[in-house]
Image (cartoon, rainbow, N blue to C red):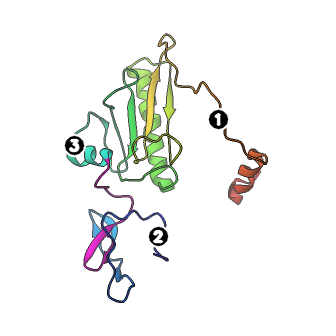
Amino acid sequence: MGGWPPSAVWLALIMRTGSGSPSVDWSQTVNGRLGKRLAGKVLVLAGSECMDCTFCHLIRDDAARWVARGPVASAFAPQNPLAPGHTLVIPTAHWADVFEVPPGDLAHTMALVQQVAAAMRTALKAGGVNVLNASGPGSEQSVPHLHFHVVPRWLDDAFSTWPTKRSRHQIADDPVTQLADAMPATHAR
């Protein structure tokens, strides 16, 4: 599949033409999202609805208790809240994790996280919030749709979301230097 966008998530089986190479027409759109016409099927790129995604089903079926709904980011109450007012904030389009989401959609999603946090402070009289995210394999991500838990906190809530143990994973060289060296030039030290 060389030459195809690496972030593409295909929602249908890729079918090949008789020549062994896909016949691609990028002019197709589905629900306003760019797609490919491949062997007569329109395949939708990441950033649209994923057929098997729990959160995409909630959006499509309007089946959540919505705190906010927008074209780029939405917020809703989880089924089993950690605290009164616990809210999940998601990009409205399907993006699996923080590694896949475009910067603009991430910025809109984080702006909604901030707005939800402010509402928790004013409406629920929360003293603070925890913002939690797990992205990618090994992170304990429960639903493969980028989401941020915004959990209101009070001084007397007798509850902790902070890890109680440290990772056993070891890295041979200095991880801070490795991270700094991997950053784009626009964020140089």
Left or right: 37 as drawn, with respect to 141? left
Assess whether mark 3 and mark 2 are in contact (beta carbons under 8 angstroms).
no
Label 2 sits on a secondary structure element that is loop
Left or right: 132 as drawn, with respect to 168? left
Rendered location of residue 12, percent (x, y): 30, 66
Compared with 95, 80 (above or below) is: above
Q: Which residue is mark 1?
A: 167
* Residue 89: quarter of image: top left
Earlier residue among tags 2 and 1: 2
Left or right: 26 as drawn, with respect to 2? left
Assess whether mark 1 and mark 3 are in contact (beta carbons under 8 angstroms).
no
Q: What separation in Å lies between label 3 and label 1 (alpha carbons)?
A: 39 Å
Q: Amino acid at mark 1?
A: Ser
Q: Which residue is mark 2?
A: 5
- Say which residue appears at 39% left-offset and 62% top-offset: 9
Q: Among all residues in the image, which is located at the extreme top? A: 156
Left or right: 75 as drawn, with respect to 175? left
Earlier residue among tags 3 and 1: 3
Label 1 sits on a secondary structure element that is loop
Q: Residue 62 has which mark?
A: 3
Q: Amino acid at mark 3?
A: Asp
Rendered location of residue 66, percent (x, y): 28, 35
Q: Residue 121 has which mark?
A: none
Q: What separation in Å lies between label 2 and label 3 (alpha carbons)?
A: 30 Å
Rendered location of residue 109, percent (x, y): 44, 44
- Say which residue appears at 27% left-offset and 46% top-offset: 59
Closer to the camera in the image, 97 or 138? 138
Q: Quadrant of the N terminus?
A: bottom left
Q: What separation in Å lies between label 2 and label 1 (alpha carbons)?
A: 34 Å
Range of residues picked out in magenta: 36-53
Q: Amino acid at mark 2?
A: Pro
Q: Mark 1 packing: few (<14 Cα in 10 Å), some, or many (20+)?
A: few
